[in-house]
Image (spheres, rainbow, N blue to C red):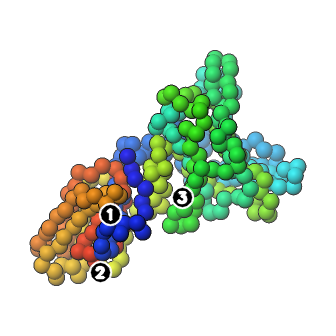
Amino acid sequence: MKKKLHLKKQNNLTGILLLILFCFSGTSKAQQFIGGTLDGNFTNVVTGWTTADSGASASVSGGFWNMSMGLQSNGKYRGDIWYNLAGNSGNYITLNSTNDAYIAIKFKGARPSGALKFEMNRSTGPTTNAWDNTAWNSGSPDGSFTDSNGDKTYYFKLTNDADFAGGNLTYRMLHLIVADNPVTETSYKVDWIATFDSTAAIETYVTATTLGVNDYQVGNDVSIYPNPSNENSFNLDLGNLLSESNVNVKIYNLLGQLVLENNILPTSSTIQINHNLKTGLYLVMVNNKANIKLMVK
């Protein structure tokens, strides 16, 4: 299981650290989909996504869900997001109470003021259904993460509802309520909607999708590449550390446990670090002198 990253609490690690994000293809890629069947990245016009509020309209472009909110009878604005299969007989969204314990939505830019709620319409038989919403329909998500661009991801813990239990469950509708916005800014963008098994997995995905694909290089001219990488290794460009007789590379997991250490006598400015690490976030220390971010998948 992935662990949350709190750099300020890593007081047992002296020196300046490199942040390494390992996101190998496989389980991490599945987080881009709801229930493994639903594209929540909005890279294409996705059948089933819609809005049903009076005066509201939505479109998919530029990789975002773009919403123009409608005026409510109370003078405030509303623009809900629906995934609706209710009219499609035999089509269901399958969610697993363990693998899909959380649903998260990432806004690009500011989230509208007002309520943010969630509910789902669960299939209880061939022609019957029920709304699951008692735990998530209070107007407040269970938590949020803010990425380095200032964009916020909000999440709901689905297992807070007693009906969301027992393995696989089938749903006809997912409904994110974005309502009671009192301000004149009446549009918003959504980057993605996805399910996860833990809050740590949400944070890992937020970090991965925010880092992008550029190499990162800061102090001491030290850099790591390629970025991203899908191999069990990365290259370390030593920069002016080449002049040192010994290079010590340590990799820690987010519990502060040392999982890999290499002592290297450098003979060239670039060295290869091989690893067998699982998907997750790791802290890497190089002679206490480097601070670099890398995404590996």
| Residue drawn where x is 45% and y is 51% of the image | 200
Disc 1, SS: strand
Q: Position of residue 280 (x, y in %)?
A: 36, 53
Residue 114 placement, left or right of 21: right
For label 3, count other residues whose C-alpha is less than 10 Å away and answer few (under 14), some (14-19) or many (20+).
Answer: some
Q: Which residue is mark 1?
A: 283
Provide residue 136's location: percent of width, then percent of height.
65, 43
Nearest to viewer (mark 1 / mark 2): 1
Residue kind at label 1, given as amino acid type: Leu
Three-letter residue code for mark 2: Asn
Q: Residues within 10 Å of mark 1 (few under 14, many from 20)?
A: many
Q: Which residue is mark 3?
A: 145
Residue under the image location 63 percent in, 25 percent down: 123
Distance between mark 3 and mark 1 Cα atoms = 20 Å
Tags 3 and 1 in contact by the CB under 8 Å rule? no
In the depicted view, which residue is nearer to us: 199 or 28? 199
Picture layout, residue 21 above or below residue 56: below
Residue 247 location in percent, x, y? 17, 73
